[in-house]
Image: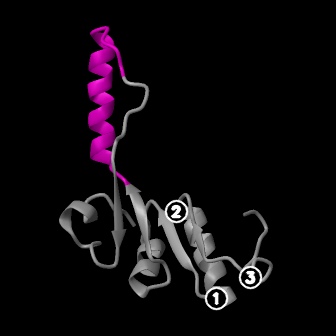
């Protein structure tokens, strides 16, 4: 929603920031608007985690770097062996919010 503001979209209920930068930009806009919106981000970062802990952002989705690495190596080995690779490979992800950010499995994939 390029250029849209909370005042120009009165029926807006929520925003999804598709990366750390857009999630933080959306959080700034929500703060400045004073409007109550559901805000969900992607990736991690110090400010995004602070916004989740404060309640400004509901939560976020983060990538699974271990899953990405494993799928990459497995796929490379299959390719070298001439085996057929699937068209889509799901490397995994995690939903995190205030309630599970300190879970060791989640905390291991978050960054500042």
Q: Is residue 63 above or below residue 38?
A: above
Vertical side of 85 occupied by 33: above or below:
below
- Label 3 to label 2, Cα distance in Å? 25 Å
Q: Mark 2 highlights which residue? A: 20
What is the residue that sits farthest to the left in this orientation?
A: 104
Which callout, 1 or 3, points at the residue further toward the start of the chain? 3
Counting residues from the N terminus, which is met first, the one under dot 3 or under dot 2? 3
For marks 1 and 3, give the CA distance. 10 Å
Displayed quadrant of residue 11: bottom right
Q: Position of residue 86 (x, y in %)?
A: 37, 24
Give percent across and percent down for residue 42: 48, 61
| 49 vs 42, nearest the viewer | 42
Q: What residue is shown at x 53% (from left), y 74% (from top)?
A: 39
Neighbours of disc 3 within 10 Å: few (<14), some (14-19), many (20+): few
CA–CA distance in space, label 1 to label 2: 21 Å
Q: Residue 30 placed where, x, y %?
A: 63, 82
Where does label 1 land, which residue? 35
Where, quadrant-wise, is the C terminus in this rendering? Answer: bottom left
């Amino acid at each position: 929603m390029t250029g849209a503001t909370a005042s120009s979209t009165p029926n807006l209920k929520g925003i999804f920031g598709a990366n750390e930068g857009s999630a933080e930009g959306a959080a700034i806009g929500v703060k400045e608007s004073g409007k109550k919106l559901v805000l969900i981000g992607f990736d991690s970062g110090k400010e995004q985690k602070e916004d989740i802990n404060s309640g400004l952002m509901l939560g976020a989705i983060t990538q699974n770097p271990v899953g990405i690495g494993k799928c990459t190596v497995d796929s490379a080995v299959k390719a070298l062996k001439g085996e057929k690779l699937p068209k889509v490979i799901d490397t995994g992800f995690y939903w995190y919010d205030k309630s599970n950010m300190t879970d060791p499995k989640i905390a291991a994939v978050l960054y500042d």
